[in-house]
Image (tube, helix red, strand yellow):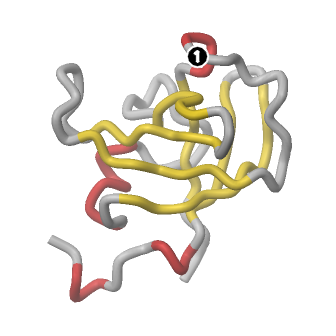
Amino acid sequence: MKKIYFTITGTKHHHGKEFLEPDMKVQLIKEPDNEYDGEAIRVELKGVSKIGYVANSPYTTIGESYSAGRLYDKIGQRATGTIVYVLPTGVLCTVDKKTLLKEKNRK
């Protein structure tokens, strides 16, 4: 299975991204009751709390990274990711494969 990338967006509304570094682990948590996006996936960093969201627009995703809508049914309520690059346009991460749902368990 090839790697699944996602972009963290909205960091400027929380704690910024200056302290983020490659290899840091992040938690992805679905927010089905989010008033702005029914497929919202919150991104948290242990000890810091919310640092942003998985990008859900072609204007905010980097390269071939998955949008929140494409990623939503591939994870359970929670998943883990790893930061790969911190770029001027966003933070590129991979989803840890062991936290992906198996094909038969997807909705």
Q: Is residue 57 above or below residue 94?
A: above
Check the image and name the residue furthest to the top. 13
Among the 4 quarters of the image, the one containing residue 20: top right
Among the 4 quarters of the image, the one containing residue 35: top left
Q: Is residue 76 above or below residue 17?
A: below
Quarter of the C terminus within the rendering: bottom left
Quarter of the N terminus within the rendering: bottom right
In the image, taking residue 67 as reference, residue 22 lies left or right, namely right
Say how many tags the image has. Answer: 1
Instruction: Estimate the x, y position of residue 83 in percent, counting from the top left.
Output: 73, 49
Instruction: Estimate the x, y position of residue 17 in percent, counting from the top left.
Output: 74, 24
Question: Around disc 1, counting alpha carbons within 10 Å, would you say few (fewer than 14), some (14 to 19), or many (20 or more)?
Answer: few
Among the 4 quarters of the image, the one containing residue 58: top left
In the image, taking residue 104 as reference, residue 58 lies left or right, namely right
Callout 1: SS: loop
Question: What amino acid is found at the position of numbered circle 1 in the picture?
Answer: His
Q: Is residue 61 above or below residue 94?
A: above
Instruction: Estimate the x, y position of residue 104 in percent, counting from the top left.
Output: 22, 88
Residue shown at 58%/16% (left/top)? Answer: 14
In the image, taking residue 57 as reference, residue 7 lies left or right, namely right
Instruction: Estimate the x, y position of residue 94 in percent, counting from the top left.
Output: 63, 58
Residue shown at 65%/46% (left/top)? Answer: 46
Residue shown at 55%/61% (left/top)? Answer: 80
- Between 88 and 63, the residue placed more toward the observer is 88
**What residue is pinned by disc 1?**
14
Residue shown at 82%/55% (left/top)? Answer: 23
